[in-house]
Amino acid sequence: MRKEISLALADFCRIDTSATREDLMMALSEATLIFPIAPPSEAGNMQLAFTSDEMGRPLLPGFTDRAHVLTWLPQGTDIAAASASGFLPALLSGPFVGLVINSKSETSVFVSREVIQMLVDGHLPSFSEADAELIQRW
């Protein structure tokens, strides 16, 4: 049975094992997440908001619900929901080094671009201790 993304995040954040990583990736591959969006451009195109890691590299923030968006950005923002089939390829088409799910929360997790590419290619990654940087608490 597949876990819902919020449950898989909580399990992974409680204990990081290859099994909780794999459950999280399976849930992510079927998830719908909420994304903060910047005001539309003059052409009316939607623009995803982004954040950066400590080295200044762009990260795509995604959230499981509006409450987690408000934890990250208390003043609120416009949002758009997207399924994995939409947001995973979108991340790869941009400059993002990864996805941060539920940033600034107890279940905040970073998923690297490499893992996102595997999911888009239809592969469920398997993990070892050496892969700790590919998915980690944020």
Image: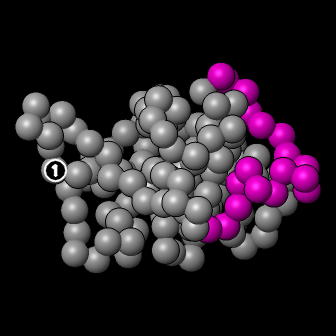
Residue type, mark 1 in image = Pro
The answer to whether residue 43 is above or below residue 131 is: above
Q: Residue at x 26, y 42 (%)?
A: 47
Q: Residue furthest top?
A: 121
Image label count: 1
Please name whichever residue, 104 or 15, is drawn nearer the observer in this view of the structure.
Answer: 104
118 part of magenta stretch: no
The answer to whether residue 83 is above or below residue 97 is: above
**Horizontal and vertical percent position of residue 3:** 63, 50
Q: In this picture, which residue range is highlighted in magenta?
A: 121-138
The answer to whether residue 14 is above or below residue 100 is: below
Please name whichever residue, 78 or 31, is drawn nearer the observer in this view of the structure.
Answer: 78
Magenta residues, dominant SS class: loop
Please name whichever residue, 10 or 39, is drawn nearer the observer in this view of the structure.
Answer: 39
How crowded pointer 1 is (Cα within 10 Å; few <14, some 14-19, many 20+) is rated as: some
Q: Residue at x 76, y 46 (%)?
A: 22
134 part of magenta stretch: yes
The residue to which callout 1 is attached is 39
How is the protein colored in the picture? Answer: one colour
Q: Residue furthest right?
A: 129
- Name the quadrant of the C terminus: bottom right
| Residue 67 visible in the current orientation | no
Label 1 secondary element: loop
The answer to whether residue 34 is above or below residue 13 is: above
- Name the quadrant of the N terminus: top right
**Horizontal and vertical percent position of residue 60:** 46, 50
Q: Residue at x 14, y 40 (%)?
A: 41
Q: Residue furthest front?
A: 55
**Horizontal and vertical percent position of residue 54:** 58, 67
| Residue 138 visible in the current orientation | yes
Q: Residue at x 37, y 39 (%)?
A: 82
Residue 64 located left or right of residue 114:
left
